[in-house]
Amino acid sequence: MSLRDPKKTKLRKILNKLNIKDILSLASNEWEIEFNQKKKLPKKSIVIERILKQLQKQNEPDRLITEENIAFADLKVLTINKKLKWSCLKLCQSNNLKNSQDNNQIGLDQINRRFYREFSLIFPESKERILIHSIIDENSQIFVRVSLNLNSKSSMDNDRKTNMDNNIIFYYVCVLPSYIFVPSATLKKRVIKQDTLFNLLELVFNCTKIKKIDLESNDLESLRQLLLFKSSQGSYKKYQLQAIKNSKLKKKILQSDQSQELKEKTGFTTEKLPIVKENLGVLKDRMENVVKQFGQFKQPIIQNLQFDIKVRLQQEKNLNDSENIDEDEELVENKNENENENIDLPFQVKFCGPDVLNGIRDLGSKGILSTPFPKSLKNIHSNSSNIYEIILK
């Protein structure tokens, strides 16, 4: 027997990415491993080693960590990962209303079967080594993990020398019924072309077309807000909050935004008040413009905005020896056609940072950006895109 189990090492590495509370939750819900938490939380390293031993006992007769153990831990990390960049795909539904209803009511077992069926058709030689796992988080989002072990034998799961680098992982987050989120790196994998992947997803979700949207972020909840509630952003968000004022979300939203709302309405913070505000009128007007544009609450989190700008220049051509040209009707027309030529001068403007929308908003409130904002920044929180094209004539 080999002294080292690569799957055990892999699972230990994944569990170390979680905090102790998430580890205990995963152990209890997925693996039925309970810990005594009456006094205080145990050390993470001790908990991880105990989990590994318990899983080995559960996995009789080989007493090995399985790919399924790794998958559920990996999915748990996925739900809280703030460093992974997500791309958004729109499900363009057919006229068949039943398809949309099916997607809205799809369950974990059904979605697992659909993914397995379609991936089996693309990789028939690896059919026995396609592993599908899925979970539902507290926001009712479905996380799906597809593992393709393409370079191994069918008995590889029982082999201690498994090369974990051979596993090719795909993740999908379903925001039903209209959108799914895919890690941006998944769309660049060589094992499956993007067109093939989109065709596969069309079959899985019963839609006529998959369309990639120019919208990316490390924050899944912000993507949900920008896509599902794009008409309720900026100054309109207060109406969205009024609609849910009796729901369980009200307390959480208002608590998180209470200090921000006070700052936006007054222009001051509760930390240290300045002694004198000589330009209080200017500050008040500036703050009113910012609140009118962005509203009183925190903006969704995105990491970049790109403006592709084309400045249309007009160039005049001088025609030499114009006195020797017989300007009949045909020559006059040709002259008018060639006299002016339009030249597009392209360049890009990028905003990059951990929280771009709130950064732009703060630049306006501090007077670094002039207010009211130009048209190019007017609806960036409602257009569900990271990339914009502007033509200046």
Image (cartoon, rainbow, N blue to C red):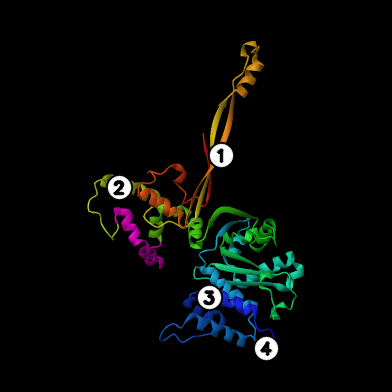
Q: Which residue is mark 2?
A: 283
The crowd level at tag 3 (other Cα within 10 Å; few <14, some 14-19, many 20+) is: some
Residue 16, numbered circle: 3
Q: Nearer the viewer, mark 2 or mark 1?
A: 1
Q: Which residue is mark 1?
A: 346
User: At 58% across and 32% down in the image, what residue appears?
Assistant: 343
- Assign a secondary structure to mark 3: loop
User: At 65% across and 63% down in the image, what residue appears?
Assistant: 204
- Assign a secondary structure to mark 2: helix
Q: Quadrant of the N terminus?
A: bottom right
Which of pointers 4 and 2 lies earlier in the amino acid sequence? 4
User: At 41% across and 66% down in the image, what residue appears?
Assistant: 249
Residue 61, numbered circle: 4
In whole angstroms, how far apart are the C-alphas of marks 3 and 4?
Answer: 27 Å
State whether residue 69 appears in this view. no
Amino acid type, mark 2: Leu
Residue 207, numbered circle: none
